[in-house]
Image (cartoon, rainbow, N blue to C red):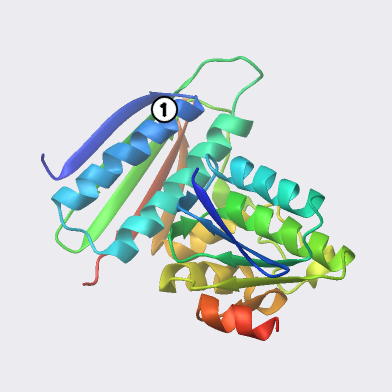
Amino acid sequence: MEIQEKIDGATVILEPLGRLDTNTSNEFEEKLAETFAAGTTQLIIDLIQVDYISSAGLRVLLMATKKIKTLKGSLILCSMSDHIKEVFDIAGFTPIFTIHQTQADAIKSLQ
Amino acid sequence: MTNNLFLRLKNTKSDIRNLSEEFDKFSVYHNLPQKVTVDIQLALDEILTNIVSYGYEAGAEGFIEVEIRLHENTLEVEVVDDALPFNILLVDDPDIQKPLQEKAIGGLGIYLVKNLMDQVEYRRLDAKNHLLLKKVITT
């Protein structure tokens, strides 16, 4: 899966493209593992290009947020489509993540 | 393309991908609303992944037949497989209120399917699992 990466100071911004499902979530998990291994503790995952997310994708995000808490860092999700918001709500995931509307809001919140 | 999409798949991940691609084409052809398309894609992903991952003894070959039927206001998805008996309606809902540290992932996919589809029916017939999902199409 294509995952675009940007750096803004100490913050890494990852932008996965397509769907976060059974097929692609392993690759995304690997990318996150690399990102953490490189010492990143401020991470924004921009979901603007994600069509949908299945439980496999939710699992990866859950592990990421647990990991970042052990690193005493910050993980922010942004630009979620209505569908992704709905899936998050159903799964009870919304209260456990920091979610912003736009990437700009997310970046600003870390400053 | 008719109002029906029928595929007979092997219990492999690559066949699941194939189904997903065919459904994308079906959805574009019939101009289905985005919400219906993504909900069905998600349901297919969850259900078929479960069948392939847990439904068979290691190395066993099986088949999964998927029929997608478009009616005026509803989309029906019927999944018939020869995997071990598995009734998704009997799976307990995960406790979604649990806080982060205790959050459980098990059963989440099935829970999403039950909540995103308007109707879910299951029968075990002729040594096969028959699952029927219905999604109302509102534009």
In the rendered image of this protein, does residue A25 appear above or below residue B51?
A: below
Percent coordinates x, y for residue A26 in the rendering: 63, 41
In this rendering, would B48 be left or right of A45? left
Name the residue at 67% across, 54% down: A59
Q: Quadrant of the C terminus of chain A?
A: bottom right
Name the residue at 28% across, 37% down: B22
Percent coordinates x, y for residue B123 in the rendering: 46, 42
Name the residue at 66% across, 61% down: B93
In the rendered image of this protein, does residue A17 appear above or below residue A89?
A: above
Marker count (numbered): 1
Percent coordinates x, y for residue A97 in the rendering: 68, 74
Depth check, front residue: B3 or A9: A9
Percent coordinates x, y for residue B111 in the rendering: 58, 59
Where residue A88 sits, quadrant-wise, is bottom right
For disc 1, the chain is B
In this rendering, would A60 be left or right of A80? right
In this rendering, would A87 be left or right of A97? left
Where residue B116 sits, quadrant-wise, is bottom left
Asked which secondary structure carries label 1, the reply is helix
Residue B106 seen in the current view: yes
Depth check, front residue: B106 or B20: B20
What amino acid is labelled 1 in the image?
Asp
**Residue at the left extreme?**
B1
Name the residue at 68% across, 79% down: A95
Label 1: how many residues lie within 10 Å, few (<14), some (14-19) or many (20+)?
some
Residue B67 seen in the current view: no
Q: Mark 1 — residue?
A: B15
In the rendered image of this protein, does residue A84 appear above or below residue A20?
A: below
